[in-house]
């Protein structure tokens, strides 16, 4: 996979802000993805857990 690099600014403080922003965006995306996965698992597993609890 080819990586693309874009220089938004020559100033180091602007580059640092851009990196911090990118890290925040990555965290938001991963948090959202984790939440969606957890919700999907709960939706699928809850009926099975309840069914197994009732059978015991």
Image: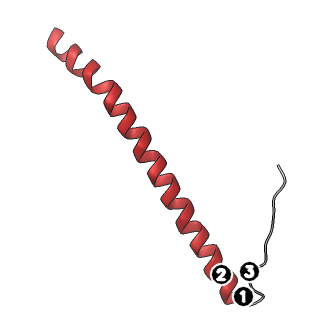
Q: Does 4 sit above or below residue 41?
A: below
- Residue 54 x %, y %: 15, 14
Q: Residue 16 got which mark?
A: 2
Q: Are marks 3 and 1 in contact (CB under 8 Å)?
A: no
Occupied quadrant, residue 50: top left
- Is residue 8 in sight in this rendering? yes
Residue under the point 64% across and 74% down: 19
| Gap in angstroms between the C-alphas marked 3 and 1 | 10 Å
Circle 1 sits in a helix, a strand or a loop, which is it? helix
Which numbered disc flags the more N-terminal residue, 3 or 2? 3
Image check: 39 left or right of 6? left
Q: Are marks 1 and 2 in contact (CB under 8 Å)?
A: yes
Q: Does 3 sit above or below residue 8?
A: above
Q: Residues within 10 Å of mark 2 (few under 14, many from 20)?
A: few
| Gap in angstroms between the C-alphas marked 1 and 2 | 6 Å
Disc 3 designates what residue?
Answer: 8
In the image, farthest residue toward the right: 2
Q: How is the image coloured?
A: secondary structure
Disc 1 designates what residue?
Answer: 12
Q: Which quadrant would the C terminus be assigned to in this image?
A: top left
| Gap in angstroms between the C-alphas marked 3 and 2 | 11 Å
Residue under the point 39% across and 39% down: 38
Residue 55 or 8: which is nearer the viewer?
8
Q: Residues within 10 Å of mark 1 (few under 14, many from 20)?
A: few
- Is residue 56 in sight in this rendering? no
Q: Are marks 3 and 2 in contact (CB under 8 Å)?
A: no
- Residue 2 x %, y %: 84, 54
């Amino acid at each position: 996979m080819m990586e693309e690099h874009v220089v938004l600014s020559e100033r180091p403080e602007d580059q640092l802000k851009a990196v911090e922003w990118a890290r925040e965006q990555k965290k938001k995306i991963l948090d959202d993805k984790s939440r969606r996965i957890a919700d999907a698992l709960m939706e699928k597993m809850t009926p099975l857990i309840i069914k197994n609890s009732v059978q015991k």
